[in-house]
Image (tube, grey):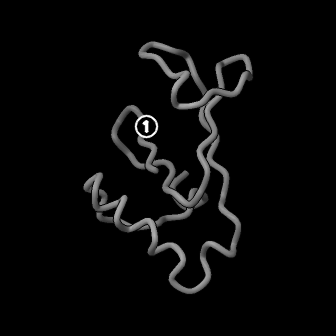
């Protein structure tokens, strides 16, 4: 739902996609991640249809759950 860098800065917000890879390119799922792993993250902009009307609002409940108050900000603006 949300990705933060080591300094706590938001880097990716759903509905944009966050892809995680081992440092040599193998893709990982959340279940694969372990403390201390060397990984790379790639943020991918969502399909523009997610941004039509109030589509993004479906994620607001999740943002609220995690205490994130800034709402959706495109990955292209965060990085």
Residue drawn 51% across the image and 15% down it: 37
Q: In this picture, is 63 found above or below 29?
A: below
Crowding at mark 1 (Cα within 10 Å: few <14, some 14-19, many 20+):
few
- Where does the image place residue 73, in percent across and percent down from the top left? 48, 65
Q: Which quadrant holds residue 19?
A: top right
Q: In this picture, is 3 found above or below 20?
A: below
Q: Please give the residue where the numbered disc 1 appears in the rendered image.
A: 5
Name the element at disc 1. loop
Q: Seen in the image, is 2 located left or right of residue 17? A: left
47 and 43: which one is in front?
47
Residue drawn 70% across the image and 66% down it: 47
- Where does the image place residue 31, in percent across and percent down from the top left? 52, 26
Instruction: Report how many numbered discs are placed on residues in the image.
Output: 1
Q: Which quadrant holds residue 49?
A: bottom right
- Where does the image place residue 14, in percent across and percent down from the top left? 51, 57
Q: In this picture, is 11 found above or below 16?
A: above
13 and 5: which one is in front?
13
Q: In this picture, is 41 found above or below 68?
A: above
Residue drawn 72% across the image and 22% down it: 26
């Amino acid at each position: 739902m949300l990705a933060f860098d080591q300094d706590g800065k938001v880097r990716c917000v759903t509905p944009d996609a966050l892809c995680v890879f081992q440092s040599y390119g193998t893709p990982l799922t959340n279940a694969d991640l372990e403390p201390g792993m060397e990984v790379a993250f790639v943020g991918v902009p969502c399909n523009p249809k997610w941004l039509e009307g109030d589509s993004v609002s479906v994620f607001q409940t999740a943002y609220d759950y995690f205490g994130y108050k800034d709402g959706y900000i495109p990955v292209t603006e965060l990085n």
